[in-house]
Amino acid sequence: MNEPVRYVQCPNCGARVAWIAESRFRPFCSERCRLVDLGAWASERYRVAGPSPEPGEDAGESGREA
């Protein structure tokens, strides 16, 4: 039994992408769009919301003494 193919939009360029196993880069349309998105995360253009650090607190410190 064949189910209808679901299509999604590429998060980077908006191209239509079939949501099937053969779509190697899904939800992206191509490796280029996947890498552009990865670069945006690496350059911190995207951020995950979270609590703001206290003034004077280093984000890399765990608060434990060595």
Image: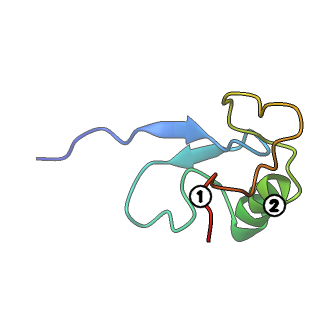
From this view, report whether residue 39 is shown above or below residue 7.
Answer: below
Mark 2 → mark 1, Cα distance in angstroms: 28 Å
Residue 20 location (% of width, % of height): 39, 55
Depth check: give the residue in front, 46 or 6.
Answer: 46
User: Residue 5 is drawn in which quadrant?
Assistant: top left
Q: On the image, numbered disc 1 is attached to which residue? A: 64
Q: Residue at x 85, y 50 (%)?
A: 44
Q: Residue at x 77, y 34 (%)?
A: 53
**Circle 1: residue type:** Arg
Q: Nearer the viewer, mark 2 or mark 1?
A: 1
Q: Which mark is residue 42?
A: 2
Q: Residue at x 64, y 51 (%)?
A: 63
Residue 54 location (% of width, % of height): 79, 31
From this view, report whether residue 21 is shown above or below residue 18.
Answer: below
| Secondary-structure class at tag 2 | helix
| Secondary-structure class at tag 1 | loop
Q: Quadrant of the C terminus?
A: bottom right
**Lateral position of residue 61 relative to residue 9, left or right:** right
Depth check: give the residue in front, 3 or 41.
Answer: 41
Q: Which mark is residue 16?
A: none
Q: Report if the CB atoms under discs 2 and 1 are less than 8 Å apart.
A: no
**Lateral position of residue 32 relative to residue 10, left or right:** right
User: Residue 57 is drawn in which quadrant?
Assistant: top right
Residue 32 location (% of width, % of height): 78, 67
**Lateral position of residue 20 relative to residue 40, left or right:** left
Q: Residues within 10 Å of mark 1 (few under 14, many from 20)?
A: few
Q: Residues within 10 Å of mark 2 (few under 14, many from 20)?
A: few
Q: Residue at x 75, y 61 (%)?
A: 38
Q: Earlier in the sequence, mark 2 or mark 1?
A: 2
